[in-house]
Amino acid sequence: MIRNKLCAMALAVAVAPAYAQESESSRMREELRQLQQRMQSLEKRLQESEAKANKAQESAAQAENTAAQAASQASSRPASESAMNPAVSAILNGVYGNLKRDPNTYRLNGFVPTMGDVGPGKRGLSLGESELAITSNIDHLFRGTLITAISPDNDTIGVEEGYIQTIGLSNGFTIKAGRFFSGVGYLNQIHAHAWDFTDAPLANKVFLGTQLNEDGIQFKWVAPTNLYWDLGAELGRGRAFPAGPAGGRNKNGFGSSNLFTHIGGDIGASTAWQTGVSYLMTSPRNRIYSDADSTGTLVTDSFSGKSRLLVLDGVLKWAPDGNPTYNNFKLQGEYFRRNEDGRLTYNTDPASAAGSAAGTLTGSYKSRQTGWYLQGVYQFLPAWRVGYRYDRLDSGTTTLGLIDSRALSAADFPILGRYNPKRNTVMVDWSPSEFSRIRLQVARDYARMNQPDNQIFLQYIVSLGAHGAHRF
Amino acid sequence: MKTLFRILSFFAIIFSFPAAAALNVFACEPEWAALAQELGGDKISAYSATTALQDAHRMEAKPSLIARMRSADLVICSGSELEIGWLPLLLTQSGNDRIQPGRPGFLEASQFVMRLEMPKVMDRALGDIHPSGNPHVHLDPRNIARIADALAGRLLEIDPANADVYRSRADSFGKRWQSALQRWEQQAAPLKGMPIVVYHKDMSYFINWAGMREVGSLEPKPGIPPTPSHLADLVERMKRAPAKVVVYSPYNSPRAAEFLSQQANVPGVMVPFTVGGTEKAKDLFGLFDDTLERLLKTAK
């Protein structure tokens, strides 16, 4: 705008002399000089004002930046409904399995099958169970957790854990109610994606059906000492192995109970440890499994009686100065001992498991079996870990009334034949961030009598969404 | 009888009880334990869950921490998701209702100050970023003063019987801190505009306070350990536009910083990062004295 005016003025000045008289020429020149001067000063002022405008714009941008930052801080506590959304996370995992023996014939000789899935997984590429977890405080008294497992094959959604937990109690008490991984042993409470190996120890497979999640109530008390010490009790429905039948008995009251205690602490700054004892008591009724008798006939055996499982567990973690970022070591082991006492029914008619049909024999059953594993995992570089695990089971002594009375022979119970399974496992994994892990695992598994299996797994595990918990 | 006595005394040592008379303060990081000690004196017993040699983000919910949380009267943590992996577990496992979020016994320090580096885009592909901004707020000395006020308020609320002690200690600390702050502001003048490379983005508040310029980090992305390719890039950049200093914390490995020092001639300096990080950083005053001293050596 100003520039246009100046141009017009300059034009006027330029054409003016053509109409001017000779005598006026000096006066005109003087005027021209003055006009030129004015023009220059106006141009200078224009530049100055433009510079000022620029500066103002800059400081406006700065102010906007600060305002945006302030606004974003304010909005970190948003007021909308979605602000109350719980923390959601998903776990995805996939495995490539290379198994020498057919996984469909997998069994742990010497031990009663557990009704659940204990196999080493599939051959070839397969998607593992996907997990969806939702967690949030419910109010000032309760916290809720729902963890569902979506099976990739039969399109079912299972509830792995779904429980409420108190946060409003004091004096060290917490109560959990719903479905949760039972506090029996150490590994049972940890979700499979956080395990240090692709599969569960053999002992967890035979004594807990891989992983026991119970519908029940858990009471826990933490002592007011500097050394960690807890005491807990669980009362449950008895919905899964070692209780039975699958799904739990049709009765009021409780089908399983578990008592546990842990102590734990630090040794200096570098080492932390925890050790515990738990005792799981169940009373299975018609807990069934299939076998083939000495004639090759498919039979159903069912157990009713008492089952008592004692577990000792220990974990020790070491890192230089307690900083696990670069190097760390974890030693973990559990010992299981199970006593079962009751009656075993042998039934050649699989259609009738109840035991009243013809071809049915019942006798006493008494067993005492043990198993243990020990594993070490070492992080030798940031993100890189190696691990070794040794598994060992002892089928111990199983006394069957039907064999003692010579009604049947040991060959009629091939799965229960004395055998001590064992397994050696090595793994190496790489975790580029806290949220992803790729693992290679190789195992030689002597679970089947006289049929060692070579198992190779290549696996990825990733977590999406809310930050996972770093549990001990 | 003698054996019985021995066994009993063994258990007495093992099952030692937390201080019953004093207020138990559970601090997630050493700087907050030090601040609580300044304000509480002998009326409190402060316990720090981590040391200067540990990365507060990577801790686990260790049994010893659950035990301490169980008896805590006040919990003070940086917050802003720094302790997200383990603090929620400690809170739910402790069976202690006094220190649950929303109660006076739970104090999230970063909520009382202006946070830097609020991410505009939330995406894990950018590394382990914190939705509520950078949580390492304690390295701006002005923030310490604000958080001290908040903490003193909580001590008064939880333990009114000793209100006079807390008030006078807070007053004395405030005065000493303000005069130290003036001294530090003068001392930090040569750092203004100085280009600096960090290991992790845990120095941002100090850099902002001192007016330094962060020109790179050894981690390619927050929480992702240094990679050879990223370090090579950084060396190239340093050759074109050298930084004056590369800093790392006591819980970081010095190797990446040493590599940069050798390849690009940028001096590496370990800063205490928190109380206990170096010999001189015995308390909060020592923390800033030593940090400034170490950085000023490279400013010349």
Image (cartoon, rainbow, N blue to C red):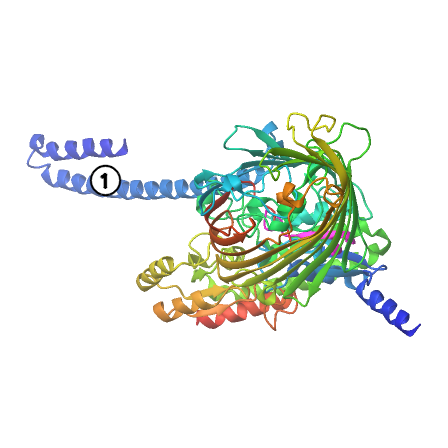
- The residue where tag 1 is placed is A39
Q: Is residue A210 visible?
A: no
Magenta range is B67-83
Residue type beneath disc 1: Met
Name the residue rendered at 65%, 51% in the picture.
Answer: A418
Query: Dot 1 falls on which chain?
Result: A
Q: Determine the image quadrant of residue A262.
A: bottom right
Left or right of residue B232: residue A168: right
Label 1: how many Cα within 10 Å (few below 14, some 14–19, many 20+): some
Please, what secondary structure does the residue beneath circle 1 have? helix
Q: Nearer the viewer, residue B206 or A265?
A: A265
Residue situated in front as seen by the camera: A369 or B264: A369
Q: Nearer the viewer, residue A106 or B298?
A: A106
Q: Is residue B75 magenta?
A: yes
User: Is residue A318 among what the camera can see?
Assistant: yes
Q: Is residue B295 above or below residue B146?
A: below
The residue positioned farthest toward the right in the image shown: B1
Q: Quadrant of the N terminus of chain A?
A: top left
Q: Residue furthest front?
A: A406
Asked whether, in this view, residue A438 is left or right of residue A150, the answer is left
